[in-house]
Image (cartoon, helix red, strand yellow):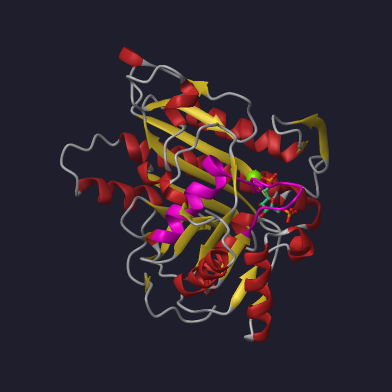
Amino acid sequence: MQDRPHAEIVRDNLTSIQAHILQEERRHPGASGDFSMIISAISLAGKAIAAKVRRSNLEDVLGAFGTTNVQGEGQQKLDVIANEIIMRCLGDRVSIAVLASEEDEEPTILRRGSEGGKYCVLFDPLDGSSNLDCGVPVGTIFTILRNDPTIKGSVETVCQPGREQIAAGYILYGSATLMVLTTGSGVDLFVLDQSIGSFLLVKRGLRIPRNSKTYSVNEAYSAQFPAGYRAFLDAAKKDGYSSRYIGSMVADVHRTLLNGGVFLYPPTTKQPGGKIRMLYEANPLAFIIEQAGGMAYSGLHRTLDVRPTQLHQRTPVTMGSPEQVDAVLASLRKHGEGA
Ligand code: AHM
Ligand code: MG
């Protein structure tokens, strides 16, 4: 891995993710520890899903489940298993009021009012799962929002603009299992040490490299993109850009976070509103990218400022190094698009 001058590589004591969150909480007088209980449940779910993903070629868990999710997409068996694992790991944490999954039609209300529940957790249990049969990295994306007990409906409760997120992260099941987490004061990287079963802090304060000439997009759809995106891609080719595309957003954005460049999923004629889910994918990843010094846009709007109106709302995305995102935005403006 290339040296990252801005990230602080942790070389001294071993710090587990639980210890790291407890230390962070100490800085906030009056913190109840509820938040660390949630992160602990997410890391437990991540370890359980990682074990399933690792054995997926050995057990009969690959392939379609034979059902479709709320968005009409075929569900993979591991999508369903990962969803179930997260619901079970998070379901008994008393500080969680609402759980919402990309795979479920409606949010699950765990407790309301006097029963407690300060937080809502939203997640995509297994992003990129259509690639599972090929052993490509997939991941769990999650975000934590505050629960406003005065709002009655569960959908209205979780339809908050991304800037209201209090934490977001993902667990990437690749050559290593790692977790990237932000609680709004930078981005930290943890790696699962299988031998002791713990996510250990390896880098603090990740910064996205600036001005990295790489784009990541499903370019086969480019004839369907609005002209501003096409013009950016044409100019990038003449400007010596390189291209990388896995097809798992969580893995593509992780590479973009570490190596720089821009990840794009523009509107297409088939999906004029974009493909990426606002609440489960775009917002958490946008929060992480911004916290690492990058930029994230939906058309010409900062992603985190968009107020979602629907639970499974989709959005176009452009996120990554500031210079590359700026170049895309300039091209959209030039073509009068993306407003
Ligand atoms: P999924 O949540 O059903 O896996 O879909 C989201 C994925 C993203 O991870 C990825 O960026 C995109 O779909 C890939 O779409 P395409 O195959 O159109 O390039
Ligand atoms: Mg997904």
In the displayed structure, would residue 287 be above or below residue 245?
above
Question: From where the camera sits, is residue 190 visible?
Answer: no
Residue 109's x, y, as percent?
Answer: 48, 20
Query: The magenta stretch spans which residues?
Result: 265-290
- Specify whether 80 is left or right of 339: right
In the displayed structure, would residue 110 be above or below residue 61?
above
Q: Residue furthest left?
A: 29
- In the image, 66 versus 281, the foreground residue is 281
Q: Residue furthest top?
A: 114
Residue at point 79%, 63% (across, down): 220
- Specify whether 260 is left or right of 238: left
Image quarter of the N terminus: bottom right
The quadrant of the picture showing ligand 2 is top right
Residue 149's x, y, as percent?
Answer: 33, 21
Question: From where the camera sits, is residue 137 visible?
Answer: yes
In the displayed structure, would residue 104 be above or below residue 74?
above
- In the image, 214 versus 46, the foreground residue is 214
Residue at point 55%, 31% (across, down): 311
Residue 170's x, y, as percent?
Answer: 52, 51
- Specify whether 64 is left or right of 204: right
Residue at point 44%, 39% (across, down): 307
Residue 130's x, y, as percent?
Answer: 76, 48
In the displayed structure, would residue 241 be above or below residue 104?
below
The total of numbered circles placed on residues is 0
- Specify whether 1 is left or right of 112: right
> Any magenta on residue 240?
no
Residue at point 37%, 31% (across, down): 119
